[in-house]
Image (tube, rainbow, N blue to C red):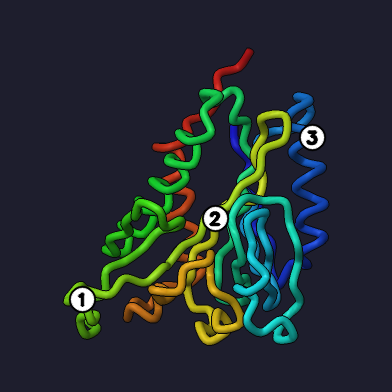
Amino acid sequence: MVEWKISEGLTDYREAETFMETRAAQIAAGEAEELIWLVEHPPLYTAGTSAKLEDLTDPDRFPVYPTKRGGQYTYHGPGQRVAYVMLNVGKRGHDVRAFVKDLEEWVIATLDEFNVKGEIREGRVGVWVTRDDKPLTATGAKPEDKIAAIGIRLRKWVSFHGISINVEPDLSHFGGIVPCGIREHGVTSLVDLGLPVTMDDLDVALERTFKDRFPPLESN
């Protein structure tokens, strides 16, 4: 079975990375169960392997952590649920694209628990929501805001890093970066959308929808 772990308070980012790398190695060696680890971090920025320096617009605002996960700059902070996903992708199909799609569908199903329609956009990473409550853009389109980010790394076909969903972070904190290199769209959260969702509510929804996308591995 996949183990679930929830850490109270704010988790140091480097300590989280060290823990994930150790656990991923143990999973690859057959010494530990797969794990979903739910955390919150103090305010910080992370730079993925595709990060561009010009997208770090306020480098002195919060600590910046280079990381080897895929993607560009992201923000983590209080009010954002980070779900670190340590799963054996080799035993779950050996297909990275399908695995990322399953992560996207997991996020979308979780948001649907709160009647929020999450959507994927070609060429734009993460999960997006269409804002019917905002004025149309200059092109006459409905504005779209990002509500969740996805960035993973694999080692010996075991994943780590994962997803983040905005529950009630300080959205102004995203202003120190160009989130995921996308300048044309904004960022939102469940509370920003007018929903009185708590972190506990989200955690319950994440666990409830997880098993439909990631069934338990068969025993050897």
Label 3 to label 1: alpha-carbon separation? 49 Å
Q: Residue at x 48, y 49 (%)?
A: 207
Q: Residue at x 42, y 48 (%)?
A: 104
Q: Is residue 25 left or right of residue 169?
A: right
Q: Nearer the viewer, residue 123 or 14?
A: 123
Label located before the other in sequence (2 or 3): 3
Q: Amino acid at mark 3?
A: Ala
Location of the C terminus (image quadrant): top right
Q: Residue at x 68, y 78 (%)?
A: 43
Q: Nearer the viewer, residue 15 or 55?
A: 55
Q: Amino acid at mark 2?
A: Ile
The kind of secondary structure element at disc 3 is helix
Q: Nearer the viewer, mark 3 or mark 1?
A: 1
Q: Nearer the viewer, mark 2 or mark 1?
A: 1
Residue 202, numbered circle = none
The kind of secondary structure element at disc 2 is strand
Label located before the other in sequence (2 or 1): 1
Q: Is residue 103 left or right of residue 26?
A: left
Residue 12 picture location, percent across and down: 78, 67
Q: Amino acid at mark 1?
A: Thr
Q: Residues within 10 Å of mark 2 (few under 14, many from 20)?
A: many
Quickly name the residue at label 3.
Answer: 25
Q: Quadrant of residue 83?
A: bottom right
Quickly name the residue at label 2.
Answer: 163
Label 2 to label 1: alpha-carbon separation? 31 Å
Question: Which residue sits furthest left?
Answer: 140
Quickly name the residue at label 1.
Answer: 139
